[in-house]
């Protein structure tokens, strides 16, 4: 029984069957990649996990509880954090404030009104946020405006924000999209380091085979809204069906 | 020095605000009576009260608009509700404002809860339109259907046959435990005359208290969440925060500020009319906040003061005053200058304000506060290069391309 169990999920947009009968099991503490050509339904599937979309059929169970019909913030509080394709951060706030918000959300839950407490007096939160920032080597940028940073830094900040919540499952939507090779390698190294340091499950949607094969323990190949094959990276590399549908002759 | 849970910097800031507020009757009276520039004196009770009241209104509005970015176009509704509440308490109990003001805060808070709950289902322009619709509905109701409560067109006021069950002998105007609002002490120093009005000091002290509350909100985790809503609501939702109750809380708090301001209007002058709820009043507070600097602590107060000053001072400059200023000029030129001035002063003061507003929005998107900050930095930078600076150690800052990533 995996931490994330997807059974018979289908989703239709008008005349387009984006997902049909998707079955997937992500084992606890594993790194699971979902790959597939453009339009295979990878992002649609991910959006079904986080509450942005509700599938027409099937079930999505996280840690034994259904996530369907729950709002994004409720699902997040259950222990699923998400890294976006384009880093979603609080651009007008400082790096430190960005991470502190995650720490507050983790400690205080979805809503708590505390108009007479002072952020500067929250020693625990500050310490926690500083630890998070030093984990991603950004402590020196703590007072920087988040919007003014490079894309690579924004990505690292977003990861720090997600990790500050101590999620059980981290969803990564093309974490290296649009990055140069050096940045990509750094991101891979960072993700490996994160994985080593804590008990966390990762589900990665990725285009870049280099990223997938250096991180994933299991790979699901999605094509035309349905899983083609699920296996270890070694077996996926040589799989004839996968070659045909997606990888072409390049691998 | 730390004070009331504020940092040293904020304590200094608060003390400056308190000093300025208490010294307003002196600061705003820089020109001697009878001089040509006396027109620009603003230290009379009526106007100073308005500075403080609209300051409160704008401080509250800023908690919603400045922090969360939700632009309400209906806050005048709460202003009206506050005024009606206070006048009703005059009619039922007596002229002591202690009954009406807390109740004004409560009733406007309840209305804000209802209006906010519905309007906050949408964001952006749709939210603005919903709040505008609610405010206009309130205005029209107050004007017509609700006449038994609001006294319609005439406006709500105290009549001699009202119950006033607590009234005592000789009580004829609003007071706070005997401190009568429209009474003033006058001080004559040479040609200068200063007026210290009870009503002004009453509103000023309340303004300081609510400014302190807003300062605390700005520095609190709650305030941080509100600022996060403004920058990226999506990220906040995916960080496990339910944004709706946060925005609703901000809406209710700012509604209560507006109700308090409306109540204070009725505390200075025991009247309440439906026109207080009209959309132009809602628009005014938007202008004040943007002109001063949305999302800054001082901005809304500066904006409120600025607009009220223009409204009351520039509109007073009529032909007679202009003649007084320019009579030394040759006739033709004098007429020309006065003719030109007609576009900017007197009844046309809106044009001056409009031009200023355009200039601020185009060149100082952060409002007057940004202007002040820029001037401050310019002065500081000017001072620095003079003489050797012991703390200045130039460091080589690597170019972006030279930096090693990660």
Image (cartoon, coloured by chain):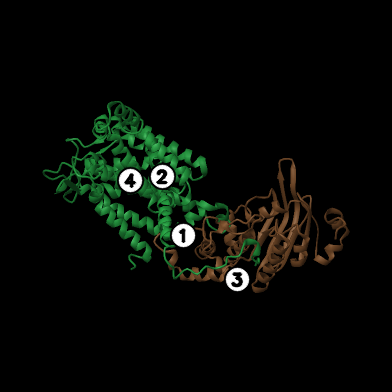
Chain colours: A brown, B green
Residue at (42, 58) in percent of width and height: B382
Verify CB contact (< 8 Å) between mark 2 and mark 3. no
Residue under pointer 1: A112
Q: CA distance from mark 2 to mark 3?
A: 42 Å
Depth check, front residue: A110 or B60: B60
Tell me if I can see residue B108 in this picture. no
Nearest to viewer (mark 4 / mark 1): 4
Chain for mark 2?
A: B
Nearest to viewer (mark 4 / mark 3): 4
Find residue A124 and report its horizontal and vertical position in percent.
48, 71
In which quadrant of the rendered image does the C terminus of chain A lie? bottom right
Find residue A75 and report its horizontal and vertical position in percent.
60, 58
Q: CA distance from mark 3 to mark 1?
A: 28 Å
Residue under pointer 2: B291
Label 4 sits on a secondary structure element that is helix
Residue under pointer 3: A135
């Amino acid at each position: 029984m995996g931490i994330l169990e997807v059974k018979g999920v289908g989703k239709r947009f008008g005349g387009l069957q984006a997902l049909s009968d998707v079955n997937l099991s992500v084992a606890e503490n594993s790194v699971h990649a979902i790959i597939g050509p453009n339009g295979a339904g990878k992002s649609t599937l991910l959006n079904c996990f986080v509450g942005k979309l509700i599938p027409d059929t099937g079930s999505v169970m996280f840690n034994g509880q259904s996530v369907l019909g729950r709002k994004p913030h409720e699902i997040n509080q259950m222990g699923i954090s998400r890294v976006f394709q384009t880093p979603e951060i609080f651009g007008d706030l400082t790096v430190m404030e960005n991470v502190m918000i995650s720490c507050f959300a983790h400690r205080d839950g979805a809503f708590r009104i505390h108009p007479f407490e002072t952020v500067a007096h929250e020693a625990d939160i500050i310490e926690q946020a500083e630890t998070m920032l030093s984990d991603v080597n950004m402590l020196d940028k703590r007072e920087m405006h988040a919007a003014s940073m490079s894309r690579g830094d924004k990505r690292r900040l977003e990861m720090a924000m997600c990790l500050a919540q101590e999620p059980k499952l981290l969803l990564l939507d093309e974490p290296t999209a649009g990055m140069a090779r050096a940045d990509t390698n750094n991101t891979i190294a960072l993700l490996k380091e994160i994985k080593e340091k804590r008990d966390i499950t990762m589900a990665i949607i990725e285009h870049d085979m280099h990223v997938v094969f250096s991180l994933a323990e299991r790979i699901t190949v999605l094509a035309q809204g349905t899983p083609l094959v699920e296996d270890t990276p070694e077996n996926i590399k040589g799989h004839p069906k996968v070659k045909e549908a997606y990888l072409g002759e390049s691998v | 020095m730390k004070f009331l849970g504020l940092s040293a910097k904020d304590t200094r800031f608060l003390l400056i605000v308190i000093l300025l507020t208490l010294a307003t009757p002196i600061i705003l009276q820089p020109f001697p009576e009878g001089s040509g520039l006396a027109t620009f004196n603003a230290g009379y009770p009526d106007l100073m009260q308005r500075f403080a009241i609209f300051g409160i209104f704008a401080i509250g509005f800023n908690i919603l608009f400045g922090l969360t970015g939700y632009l309400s176009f209906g806050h005048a509704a709460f202003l009206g509700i506050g005024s009606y509440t206070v006048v009703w308490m005059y009619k039922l109990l007596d002229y002591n404002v202690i009954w009406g003001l807390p109740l004004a805060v409560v009733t406007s808070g309840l209305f804000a809860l209802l209006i906010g709950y519905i309007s906050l289902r949408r964001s952006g322009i749709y939210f603005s339109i919903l709040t505008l619709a609610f405010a206009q509905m309130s205005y029209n109701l107050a004007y017509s259907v609700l006449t038994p409560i609001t006294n319609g067109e005439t406006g709500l006021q105290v009549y001699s046959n009202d119950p006033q069950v607590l009234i005592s002998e000789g009580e004829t105007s609003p007071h706070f435990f005997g401190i009568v609002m429209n009474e003033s002490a006058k001080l004559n120093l040479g040609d200068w005359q200063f007026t210290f009005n009870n009503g002004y000091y009453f509103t000023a002290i309340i303004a300081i208290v609510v400014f302190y509350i807003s300062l605390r909100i700005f520095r609190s985790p709650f305030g941080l969440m509100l600022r996060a809503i403004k920058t990226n609501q999506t990220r906040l939702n995916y960080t496990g925060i339910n944004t709706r109750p946060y925005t609703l809380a901000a809406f209710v708090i700012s509604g209560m500020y507006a109700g308090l301001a409306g109540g204070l209007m009725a505390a200075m002058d025991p009247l309440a009319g439906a026109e207080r709820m009209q959309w132009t009043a809602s628009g005014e507070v938007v202008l004040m906040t943007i002109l001063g600097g949305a999302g800054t602590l001082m901005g809304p107060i500066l904006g409120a003061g600025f607009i009220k000053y223009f409204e009351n001072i520039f509109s007073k400059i009529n032909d007679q005053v202009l003649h007084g200023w320019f009579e030394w000029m040759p006739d033709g030129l004098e007429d020309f200058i006065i003719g030109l001035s007609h576009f900017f002063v007197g009844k046309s003061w809106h044009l001056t304000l409009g031009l200023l507003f355009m200039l601020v929005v185009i060149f100082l998107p952060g409002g007057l506060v940004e202007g002040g900050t820029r001037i401050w930095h310019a002065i500081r930078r000017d001072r620095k290069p003079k003489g050797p600076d012991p703390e200045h150690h130039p460091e080589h800052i690597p170019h972006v391309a030279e930096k090693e990533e990660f």
